[in-house]
Image: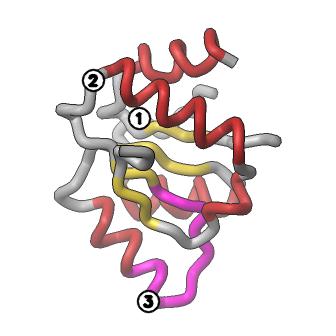
């Protein structure tokens, strides 16, 4: 199974490093949220973010407009690094990117 994950600039790089140790960096730093969501949808990547202020609104806008959205995982910043990694490893182990199409997922997913 393959899960393609894009992180925005507010996700700690240790989360992805931890996931990779257990089981991409693209040049979007500073891009606007709608542009990041568009890129992720076009490239088939799930977006991970802590940004609860703006990303959910833009994701819901895409849903309402019937625009493609590969998926967005909202990760609370207070969730420990280990919990973030564990949830992502479990999700990656039992699903494909396509399983999350159009979904806005609030983590923790398994608690």
Q: Which residue is mark 2?
A: 80
Magenta region: 61-72
Residue 23 at x, y = what percent? 70, 18
Asked where in the image residue 30 lies, by quadrant, the reply is top left
- Which badge, 3 or 1, comes first in the chain's sequence? 1
Taking the magenta stretch, the answer to whether it contains residue 64 is: yes
From this viewpoint, which residue is outermost toward the right?
A: 1
Q: CA distance from mark 2 to mark 3?
A: 32 Å
Name the foreground residue: 90 vs 101.
Answer: 90
Residue 11 in the figure: left or right of residue 85: left
Q: CA distance from mark 2 to mark 1?
A: 24 Å
Taking the magenta stretch, the answer to whether it contains residue 2 is: no
Name the foreground residue: 1 vs 53.
Answer: 1
Q: In the rendered view of the protein, which quadrant contains the N terminus?
A: top right
Q: Which residue is mark 3?
A: 64
Mark 2 lies on a secondary structure that is: loop
Q: CA distance from mark 3 to mark 1?
A: 26 Å
Asked where in the image residue 14 lies, by quadrant, the reply is top left
Mark 1 lies on a secondary structure that is: loop
From this viewpoint, which residue is outermost toward the bottom?
A: 65
Query: Residue visible at 48% across and 82% down?
Result: 63
Residue 61 at x, y = what percent? 38, 80
Numbered label attached to residue 110: none
Residue 72 in the figure: left or right of residue 94: left
Q: Which residue is mark 1?
A: 29
| Residue neighbourhood size for the residue with mark 2, other residues' Cα within 10 Å, grouped as few (<14), some (14–19), many (≥20) | few
Residue 12 at x, y = what percent? 35, 22
- Which badge, 2 or 3, comes first in the chain's sequence? 3
Can you tell which of label 2 and label 3 is closer to the viewer?
2
Residue 49 at x, y = what percent? 36, 44
């Amino acid at each position: 199974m393959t899960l393609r994950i894009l992180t925005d600039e507010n996700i700690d790089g240790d989360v992805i490093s931890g996931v990779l140790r257990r089981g991409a960096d693209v040049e979007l730093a500073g891009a606007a949220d709608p542009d990041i969501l568009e890129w992720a949808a076009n490239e088939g990547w799930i977006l991970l973010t802590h940004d609860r202020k703006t990303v959910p609104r833009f994701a819901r806008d895409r849903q309402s407009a019937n625009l493609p959205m590969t998926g967005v995982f909202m990760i609370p910043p207070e969730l420990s690094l280990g919990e973030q990694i564990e949830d992502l490893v479990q999700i990656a182990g039992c699903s494909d990117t396509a399983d999350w199409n159009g979904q806005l997922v609030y983590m923790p997913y398994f608690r």
